[in-house]
Image: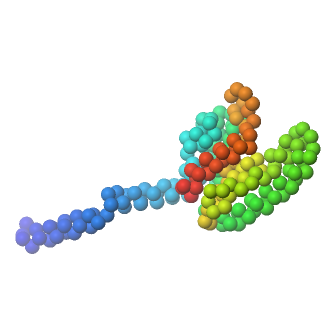
Amino acid sequence: MTGRSLRFTLICGLALAAQGCGSEPGGDNAAALEASDNASAEADPCALVTREEVTAAIGETVVKAQSDGEGCSYETEDAMASSVKVEATRTGGAREMQTAREAAGVLGRIGGEMAQGKGAEAQAGEAMAEGGAAPGLGDQAFFGANQQLHVLKGDSYLAVTPPTMRSRMSGGNPLLSDDQKRAMARAIAEKALARL
């Protein structure tokens, strides 16, 4: 190797080393991994919340998570009793939120009338009533019928439908209270919003 080519090799090596000195360890890799995670969550709605996170939120083991376009359904062994649905749109969130508010208003009015009845009709009416605001989530959030949580974050919209009851295989009353459903939906939404 001649002196000139040796100097060129050393200069190139030092330039590459100096380029790496100004960056944080793993900085480029961390950014690339985060971008990859976000792209994965965009491509697969089930990547917004893991089965383990839904399991922790509802207190029952999720055995299946299945994507159906913009949403993901999480099912336990008793899928009819304790399934969860997470839906997200990344653009047009304000429009989706407005539609959700309008639907909740209509259902709330119908539910209010039904709640004046007796038995199952009154219970169905109560489930249709709007559950109120959900402060601390996204830019705005509210609980709709059956405590479905609607969240607007920037231009993204998120809807979390909690289970209506516990597994029929568990002991005791399987019906979940509104407070339990709201807590479950909130816990799931917090995980999804961190990735949205």
Report the side of 6 relative to 178 (left or right): left
Q: Is residue 137 above or below residue 180?
A: below
Report the side of 103 relative to 154 (left or right): right
Residue 77, by quadrant, is top right
| Residue 133 screen position, x and y as percent | 71, 56
Residue 26, by quadrant, is bottom left
- Count the marks: how many? 0
Q: Nearer the viewer, residue 9 or 47?
A: 47
Q: Is residue 25 above or below residue 55?
A: below
Report the side of 124 relative to 79 (left or right): right
Which image quadrant: the N terminus?
A: bottom left
Furthest residue toward bottom:
4
Residue 154, by quadrant, is bottom right
Residue occupying the point 63% across, 39% down? 58
Q: Is residue 22 above or below residue 37?
A: below
Q: Is residue 185 above or below residue 76?
A: below
Q: Nearer the viewer, residue 187 or 160?
A: 187
| Residue 68 screen position, x and y as percent | 65, 51
| Residue 91 screen position, x and y as percent | 62, 65
| Residue 10 screen position, x and y as percent | 14, 67
Residue occupying the point 6% across, 71% down? 3
Residue occupying the point 36% across, 60% down? 27
Residue 156 shows in the view: no
Furthest residue toward top:
171
